[in-house]
Amino acid sequence: MVAKKSIKFIKFLVLFLVSFNGFAGGDKNPQGNTIDTPDEIREYISHHLKDSHDFHFFTDNASGTHYSFPLPVIVWTSEGLKTFMSSAFHHDDAGHVVVEKGGVKLTKIHSKIYELESGASSVSFDEDHHATNAHKVLDFSITKSVFGMLLAGLLMFLGFVALAKSYKKGPIPTGFGRVLEPLVIYVRDDIARPNIGDKKYRKFMGFLLTVFFFIWILNLLGLTPLGFNVTGQIAVTVCLAIFTAIIYLFSASKDFWAHTLWMPGVPVILRPILAVIELVGFVLIKPFSLLVRLFANMTAGHFVVMSLIALMITLKKDFGPIGSTGMSLVLALFISVIEILVAFLQAFIFTMLSSLFIGMAVEEHDHH
Amino acid sequence: MYNLIGAGLIVIGGGIGLGQIGGKAMEGIARQPEAAGKIQTAMIIIGALLEGLAFGALILGK
Amino acid sequence: MVAEAVLKKIKQKKLSNLYSMETLLNDFSVGLFVMQAVILLIIILLMRKFAWKPILNALDEREGGIANALKSAENAKLEMQNLQADNQRLLKEARAEREEMLKEARDMKNKIIEDAKTEASDTANKLVAQAQASIESEKKAAIADLKSQVANLSLEIAEKVVRTELSNKDKQLQLVETMLGEKSLN
């Protein structure tokens, strides 16, 4: 039931995406030529690793047609909130196209939207890559990453609400719920319970389960050719880590604060030093390690997979088209399989460490 | 240039650490196969902490 | 050659700009952060309300149900064992009772036979005694009768003898003597 529904949903989504061809087609590629030199490949990869304002599948270089669909741009400028579709930029990412909206001139460079100051017609940079006649705007656009998050949230919501509803019919779920139920039990019994403790784990299950499946689905979406790199956006991982930090800092027990700020059983002189170390550890280092691990793993994964795919082009001279394609296919396949494991592992580790930190915070020490 | 040398050192250090963790975990599992699950979980957690450290150093160092 | 090219590229800062702290900070989009925070919060709240709570409750319920079922199965097993023990005991008791009853019956039978035997022998003895007594009395009566007849006879004889041979006194005496000797029966 659920599986059929979700397949239908994906079919609908694909049709929806493809139907945008006509809408987006016809824009001429400003650069227009094939990506074949290492520098261009590097540029392409680093572009992919960044967020983007439209959903780009591929570009037909012969006709210069982009197969993509635009996403809404919502920016907070000096003149207030401005919204328009990203198609207004005509796939420009180098600051050539300037969009005028209600007295504000906006342009996009490397996936960042700049507001030009009055009189300027293009952004100029100083030596340190700081814009001299423009500033970045607060960008609340439905970018590709936001779109991915909404998609992941929707998939999650549909799947698990269906599972929740199937319990009304009987104690054993049917259909796709049979796959999801063991995962929920896994998170509960192998991640939350042993780390937080049998008494207190229930309160945090909502967060842990949501984060686990959210990260996992987004990681897996990143492996599809749709080209999402949501968990490889530093802002996303920062947000996830801050959520974890807020949860464990605000649910910490008295014991935790007593032990952190005034460690018993240690010479009094050492106590303030330890307090500082512990505090920095809990407030900064632990969230930082959480966010950096997820970000770096996903970025590195995407980078490696794309570099191996690019071997097809870079090794063409040495091995011929068939040899280079075969090599890149085998290597990319191998790394992709490892990336599927990493996608799960990173979701698992994020949830595991979150619950570990929460467990440390809520633990009640027995008084000796 | 020095950045790359530093990155190399970080990777060497991280590699040694991961090797130690993995090796000891294997020994532990060989000695007590019934505790394999617990050892694996602990191994992954420590590996993750090490990984975070190495990535942090890589990013801060550059 | 290759090393030179690599060095050149490093000098151009093309290899090392992928992952520096500066690029990271530059890549950090406040807008994306805000959007992510809002979306994550909404997802967490929605999922908590519509998915996780019912799922976890259903799981708890099911696990509780399974535990209860196992417990009641255990109880039923114990009860069964008790019942079986009871049955065994009852059977044993019944067997013992039957045994007892059989024994009693056998005893009773023996007693009845014994009684019958003693009674019979008593009766027989009594009859024999009666018979003996009656034989004795008959005998006595017969002897008395005989005695009186003998006396009569002897008187008759004596009469006859006296009548015939009264002449010879010696002979008479002798005769009486012999006759009396002959007649001493008892």
Image: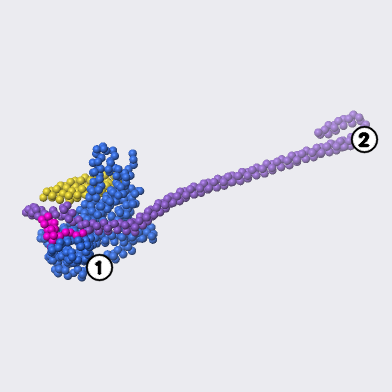
Measured as percent of width and height from the top left, residue C58 is found at: 37, 56
For the C terminus of chain A, the quadrant is top left
Q: Which chain is yellow?
A: B
What residue is shown at x 16% (from left), y 54% (from top)? C23
| Residue density around tag 1, few if under 14, some if 14–19, many if 20 or more, within 10 Å | few
Front residue of C18 and A284: A284
Measured as percent of width and height from the top left, residue A362 is found at: 31, 47
Mark 1 — on which chain does it sit?
A
Q: Is residue C137 magenta?
A: no
Q: Which chain is blue?
A: A
What residue is shown at x 27% (from left), y 64% (from top)? A10
Disc 1 target residue? A15
Chief secondary structure of the magenta portion: loop
Q: Secondary structure at mark 1?
A: helix
* Boundaries of the magenta span: A122-138
Please identify which colour was used for chain C in the image. purple
Q: Secondary structure at mark 2?
A: helix
What residue is shown at x 73% (from left), y 40% (from top)? C126
Measured as percent of width and height from the top left, residue A80 is found at: 22, 62
What colour scheme has been applied to the protein in the rendered image? Answer: by chain
- Marks 1/2: CA distance? 181 Å
For the N terminus of chain A, the quadrant is bottom left
- Which amino acid, by three-letter code, is at mark 1? Leu
Measured as percent of width and height from the top left, residue A322 is found at: 14, 62
Disc 2 target residue? C163
User: Residue A134 shows which numbered tag?
Assistant: none
- Which amino acid, by three-letter code, is at mark 2? Arg
